[in-house]
Amino acid sequence: MELGAFSVSLAVKDIAASRAFYEKLGFAAIMGEEAQNWLIMKNGDHVIGLFQGMFDKNILTFNPGWNANSETLPTFTDIRQIQQALKTGGIEVGADIDPESTGPANFSITDPDGNVILFDQHV
């Protein structure tokens, strides 16, 4: 099962302070608006999202259909197939995606330690 691009979405208290910190680690903002309290930052193939006031905890994120540069892959495992495989494997899934739908969709799961994993397909 190909999960797509991986990133960590961080729930930050002060987006400007977090941006300055991660810039010192070599990350640069590639998407988002600090004034809207969200930024996507990248260092090589490593991607982090900074989100102030949007959710309570950090989230692991997979983007089916994208590579590390947010470019659409020519072939990929559709999010609906991923969701079905996880359900078949006994993993409880959040809101179901209509299996007959196409295009962008998302769902989340929670690991045994309470970490949220978001599957967010944009294509």
Image: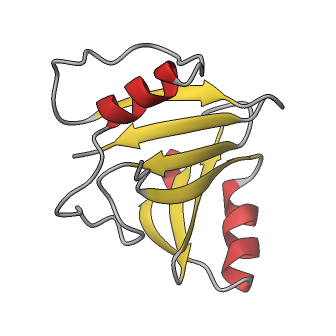
Q: Nearer the viewer, residue 75 or 65?
A: 75
Q: Is residue 23 above or below residue 87?
A: below
In the rendered image, is residue 33 in sight? no
Q: Residue at x 41, y 40 (%)?
A: 120
Residue 5: x %, y % from top left:
44, 60
Q: Residue at x 49, y 20 (%)?
A: 87
Q: Residue at x 37, y 72 (%)?
A: 69
Q: Quadrant of residue 90?
A: top right
Q: Quadrant of residue 95?
A: top left
Residue 29: x %, y % from top left:
50, 72
Q: Nearer the viewer, residue 19 or 6?
A: 6
Residue 85: x %, y % from top left:
43, 29
Residue 121: x %, y % from top left:
33, 42
Residue located farthest toward the right when viewing the structure as drawn: 113
Q: Quadrant of residue 98?
A: top left
Query: Left of 97 or right of it: where is 57?
Result: right
Q: Is residue 59 above or below residue 30?
A: above
Q: Is residue 1 above or below residue 66?
A: above
Residue located farthest toward the front when viewing the structure as drawn: 89
Q: Residue at x 52, y 16 (%)?
A: 94
Q: How many marks?
A: 0
Q: Nearer the viewer, residue 50 or 83?
A: 83
